[in-house]
Amino acid sequence: MLSGKRIILGVTGGIAAYKAAFLLRAFQKAGAEVRVTMTPDATRFIGVETFSSLSKHEVAVEVFPENQSTTDLWTKHISWGEWGDLFVIAPCTANTLAKIAHGISDNMLTATALAARCPLLICPTMDGEMYEAPAVQQNLKMVKEHGYHILEPEEGYLASGLEGKGRLPYATAILEKSDEIIRNAQANGPLAGKKVVVTAGPTREHIDPVRFISNPSSGKMGVAMAEAAKQMGADVTLIHGPVSIPKPTTISTIEIESAAELFEQVKAHANADIVIMAAAVSDFTPAEKHNQKVKKDNSDSALKLEQTQDILSWLGNHKKEGQLLIGFAMETENLLDNAKAKLKKKKADWIVANSLSESGSGFQSDTNAVHLLNASTDHRFQGTKKEVARQILAHIFN
Ligand code: CTP
């Protein structure tokens, strides 16, 4: 049920911290990707390595960890806060609850809670007497007023030896609540009710059945844009060429091969509210396509090419009322000038400008560094392609 969803799992320092390892596995089994942030006290109950091994990702504990000299690490609360679809704090101690209620951000978990753009689910877990304490009840009221979600603890046998309300709910209950929160967030997202078409990946222009002209586009950026639009509540159709990554399972997809096929599909979906042209469309196609393999002995070595339809330009010239067009520009030189020229020429509303010569960006890379341009503004975003996709859409639609 949580397929493709990104969960930040926050683990705080209570005895139920060990259960968070099982919870992480349950999220993964449901198809979610999980990153873990722990409070320093949580590491007294369960090791960082348990969570880094299970999540296959670094675990964030301190904002300024010792023995850590990298300059970008301390901003993880911001990038994770953008990455997640949901931040689940399970178990959440009375101490962390109090910090969240009052906006204290003295470790990576509490800082991420404050920075998160996604919904927050708090699973308060403590001894029954503590749970009933007026200060805890007051803090629970406060976090609800902040718009955070609470999953009430269950009654039963507690680590103190007493019986009472304070146990961490079973993983199934936490997963169900998480799914409900994410669904509601999407239903109320800034793109709810909008039809969005995203094109992704390369096209292939066949010379004969075994040879074609193409480019190294992996489709990562386009797929990330489609997923980001979906997370914001859009009804997304992804039209993609032969991508080298797994196709998203929760988005309706249409597979094409050539620029001509892509054009046909885009025209068929041109009534969308938003079209995002992230595909690396081939500009040329062989003038003649052979049905059989061309033999080297009896062929002319010169390949005659003709231009393909510029699909984004066509969209710009056939724009329906209120439609928004987002194009991409892949450049090796004069990035901003060339991108601005494309914005104008193709009548796009926004252009995402990529420079192939910049490190950390380009066709196969997992990361990207882009400029988002419209007629009057220029914003720069960088990070993983998934993060950049979210930043772009958040900038345009939030
Ligand atoms: N594009 C398109 N149809 C084409 C070629 C490109 O719709 N036949 C779209 C791309 O999907 C992208 C934008 O136009 O959104 C810019 O693509 P890019 O490859 O950067 O530029 P080109 O228009 O192909 O120009 P050039 O190759 O001269 O840089």
Image (spheres, rainbow, N blue to C red):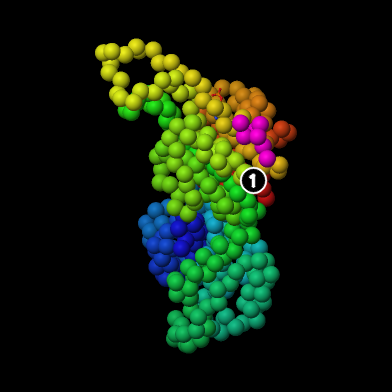
Q: Is residue 52 visible?
A: no
Q: Is residue 267 visible?
A: yes
In the depicted structure, whether residue 88 falls above or below residue 358: below
Q: Toward the viewer: 289 or 345? A: 289
Q: Which residue is mark 1?
A: 273
Outermost residue, bottom direction?
Answer: 163
Coordinates of residue 285 in the picture (x, y in percent): 46, 23
On whether ligand 1 comes within 8 Å of the CB at mark 1, the answer is: no
Coordinates of residue 41 in the picture (x, y in percent): 49, 66
Badge 1: how crowded within 10 Å, few (<14), some, or many (20+)? many
Q: Where on the picture, by quarter, is residue 342?
A: top right
Q: Look at the image and say whether residue 180 sits in the magenta stretch.
A: no
Q: Toward the viewer: 26 or 207? A: 207
Coordinates of residue 195 in the picture (x, y in percent): 60, 49
Residue range in magenta is 314-320
Q: Secondary structure at mark 1?
A: loop
Tally the numbered discs: 1
Indicate the quadrant of ligand 1 in the picture: top right
Task: Name the residue rendered at 66%, 63% in the picture.
Answer: 103
In the depicted structure, whether residue 208 falls above or below residue 277: above
Q: Toward the viewer: 41 or 255? A: 255
Outermost residue, front direction?
Answer: 291
Task: Name the residue rendered at 42%, 30% in the picture.
Answer: 204
Query: On the picture, is 211 further left or further right than 124?
Result: left
Q: Toward the viewer: 159 or 232? A: 232
Coordinates of residue 356 in the picture (x, y in percent): 51, 28
Task: Name the residue rendered at 28%, 16% in the picture.
Answer: 296
In the depicted structure, whether residue 190 falls above or below residue 330: below
Residue flagged by tag 1: what amino acid is it? Asp
Outermost residue, right direction?
Answer: 376
